[in-house]
Image (cartoon, rainbow, N blue to C red):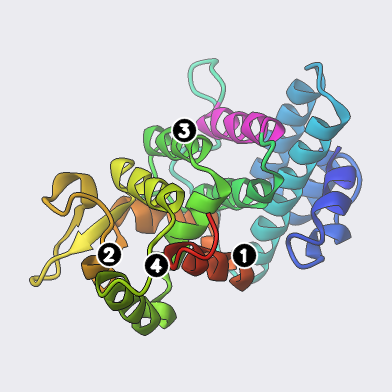
């Protein structure tokens, strides 16, 4: 499963996934340490008992491979997996890690927008290292990810990219002056990020309020210089590594705000 997923998603992740092969336990045993290897092996067995289509198996394998590679790479750089009991079974129940990973892999299986799959793998790896993300918060992230389209992920990263701040201000001015008429579809997607409390408006004192909690009334050209991820949005972007979304997809977001595409 992992080997097939690795091959299928290698192009999406720059080719590195293609280096992974073999059963889940073997892959993780080599790169992620005892706790993560045991957990992946267990869930590999659980997932394999489900009736899955070949495409679903490939997507699960792709997400698992991305997670495995990131975990191994970060450990090679000296980082340590969280040690707050996240990986430990409690009172005969499954560990929090088992539940989080199962949720992520099953969501990967159902992700017909396959561009989302690698970022699910990053989400698990990010949570595995970050003890500030409680299991409850992790489940919120997983549910939130499920509700977002791939383009909504790209919109979130678009407003997070500090290198594009000047261009966003210029685009906002153009919208206000009538030079551009943003796609209604794209505006709706952007406003949904506000409803999810992922996107906000930075006030003069530096405080960021979710767009849904302000009088902004949604995304407007005049706000393009101050729209930014909320704290939840920043956590989400960091854990899922949305910074790896291709520049061409971010360019399409800008084109949508200019009204060139829907």
Q: Earlier in the sequence, mark 3 or mark 4?
A: 3
Other residues around mark 1 within 10 Å, as few (<14) / some (14–19) / many (≥20)? some
Q: Earlier in the sequence, mark 4 or mark 1?
A: 1
Residue 172 placement: quadrant: bottom left
The alpha-carbon separation of the residues under discs 3 and 1 comes to 26 Å
Decide whether the magenta segment is chiefly helix, strand or loop: helix
> Which of labels 3 and 1 is toward the front?
3
Between residue 88 and residue 65, name the one nearer to us. 65
Q: Secondary structure at mark 3?
A: helix
Span highlighted in magenta in the image: 95-110
Other residues around mark 4 within 10 Å, as few (<14) / some (14–19) / many (≥20)? many
Q: Earlier in the sequence, mark 3 or mark 2?
A: 3
The alpha-carbon separation of the residues under discs 3 and 2 comes to 23 Å
Other residues around mark 3 within 10 Å, as few (<14) / some (14–19) / many (≥20)? some
Q: Secondary structure at mark 1?
A: helix
Between residue 155 and residue 4, name the one nearer to us. 155
The alpha-carbon separation of the residues under discs 4 and 1 comes to 23 Å
Q: Which corner quadrant holds the N terminus?
A: top right
The alpha-carbon separation of the residues under discs 2 and 4 comes to 9 Å
User: According to the image, label 1 marks what residue?
Assistant: 74
The alpha-carbon separation of the residues under discs 3 and 4 comes to 21 Å
Q: Is residue 32 visible?
A: no
Between residue 14 and residue 27, name the one nearer to us. 14
User: According to the image, label 2 marks what residue?
Assistant: 227
Please give the name of the residue rendered at 33% of the width and 48% of the height, measured from the top-left corner: 191
Residue furthest front as drawn = 178
Find residue 177 and report its horizontal and vertical position in percent: 26, 75
Q: Which mark is residue 143?
A: 3
In magenta segment, residue 162: no
> Which of labels 4 and 1 is toward the front?
4
């Amino acid at each position: 499963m992992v080997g097939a997923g690795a091959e299928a998603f290698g192009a999406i992740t720059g080719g590195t996934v293609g280096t992974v092969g073999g059963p889940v336990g073997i892959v993780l045993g080599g790169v992620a340490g005892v706790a993560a290897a045991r957990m992946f092996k267990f869930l590999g067995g659980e997932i394999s008992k489900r009736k899955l289509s070949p495409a679903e198996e490939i997507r699960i394998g792709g997400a698992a491979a991305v997670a495995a590679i990131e975990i191994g790479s970060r450990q090679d750089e000296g980082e340590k997996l969280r040690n707050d009991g996240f990986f430990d079974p409690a009172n005969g129940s499954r560990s929090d890690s088992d539940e989080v990973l199962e949720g992520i892999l099953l969501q990967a299986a159902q992700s017909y927008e396959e561009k989302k799959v690698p970022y699910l793998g990053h989400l698990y790896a990010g949570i595995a290292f970050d003890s500030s993300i409680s299991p409850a918060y992790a489940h919120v992230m997983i549910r939130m990810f499920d509700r977002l389209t791939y383009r909504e992920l790209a919109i979130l990263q678009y407003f997070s990219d500090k290198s594009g701040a000047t261009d966003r201000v210029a685009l906002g001015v153009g919208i206000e002056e009538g030079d551009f008429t943003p796609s209604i579809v794209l505006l709706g997607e952007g406003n949904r990020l506000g409803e999810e409390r992922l996107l906000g408006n930075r006030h003069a004192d530096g405080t960021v309020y979710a767009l849904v909690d302000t009088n902004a009334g949604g995304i407007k050209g005049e706000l393009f210089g101050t729209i930014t991820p909320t704290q939840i949005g920043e956590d989400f972007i960091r854990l899922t590594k949305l910074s790896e979304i291709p520049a061409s997809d971010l360019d399409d977001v800008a084109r949508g705000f200019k009204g060139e595409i829907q």
